[in-house]
Amino acid sequence: MKKLFLGLAVTASMMTFAQETKTVNTDPIKKEKQPIRFGIKGGVNSSYFSEQKLSLDNQKIGFHAGVLVNIPLSQKFSLQPEVLYNQLGARSVISSTDVTTGATNVKTKSEYKTTMNYISVPLMIQMRPTERFYVEAGPEFSYYINGKNSGDSTISTTTGGITTTQSVSNSEDINKDNVNKFNLGLGLGLGYDITQNLGINARYINSLTDMRNQKPEGTEPLNHRAFQLGLNYKF
């Protein structure tokens, strides 16, 4: 009888211990917010003016380069200020002809380019649907540094398989007094992190400010439009 009571006591003690055992939390560990990271970026610009139709004939090729800092706000959102040297402008093909007379072919091309250099400060809000891919949007503040207008005319004559080319070029600096020094734009883009440090980014910039210091009465605003494609490296 004593053995029976002793067995029951041991069994009851084991059941009480099992009930008091702390339940282990099996929920997955949440990802922590990423640290602030600094980096550099650079790439190609393709720009034109708002008064022009979008075509290859009016795209001015330039570049952008500078530094960035990525500040995570949460697991999916981050703030990315940048400071860039930004080359904008436009190109216009005034005339282009291709005439063949007998055995002689004559090609002529005249074009006009405007190059405008800015220090730009984009302030992008980035959202990550996935770990590597993100979309971004935000304002871009720019300050005009300098620029120039240039014209080029080329005549190429081909006779009997031999080509001779004549070129005439001229350029002049843009008068800073005619340019609105400050420019406000809106950026929209997307990007992909190829590795933890290296990424690729594409962005479209739509200027909201007339680039002229004084807009002639009865005219439409003259704004910048630009496509950017570049690489970035975060440390």
Image (spheres, grey):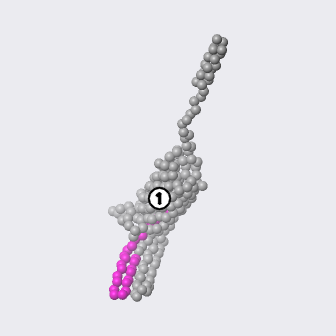
Quadrant housing the N terminus: top right
Q: Nearer the viewer, residue 64 or 118?
A: 64
Is residue 178 shown above or below 27?
Answer: below
Residue 19 falls left or right of residue 102: right
Residue 79: x and y, percent? 52, 50
Inspect this view and state whether residue 181 appears: no
Inspect this view and state whether residue 168 appears: yes
Q: Is residue 88 magenta?
A: yes
Q: Nearer the viewer, residue 23 or 164?
A: 23
Q: Is residue 97 magenta?
A: yes
Q: Nearer the viewer, residue 47 or 174?
A: 47
Segment tinted magenta in the rendering = 86-110
Determine the residue positioned at 59% across, 28% down.
22
Residue position for label 1? 202
Q: Residues within 10 Å of mark 1 (few under 14, many from 20)?
A: some
Determine the residue positioned at 49% across, 64% down.
44
Badge count: 1
Residue type at tag 1: Ala
Quadrant housing the C terminus: bottom right
The image quadrant of residue 149 is bottom left
- Kindly give the residue lying farthest to the top in the view shown: 1
Q: Secondary structure at mark 1?
A: strand
How would you classify the magenta stretch by its main secondary structure?
A: strand
Q: Nearer the viewer, residue 138 or 198?
A: 198
The image quadrant of residue 5 is top right
Determine the residue positioned at 43% across, 86% down.
162
Residue 212: x and y, percent? 42, 63
Determine the residue positioned at 55% across, 51% down.
70
Residue 58: x and y, percent? 40, 68
Residue 185: x and y, percent? 44, 57
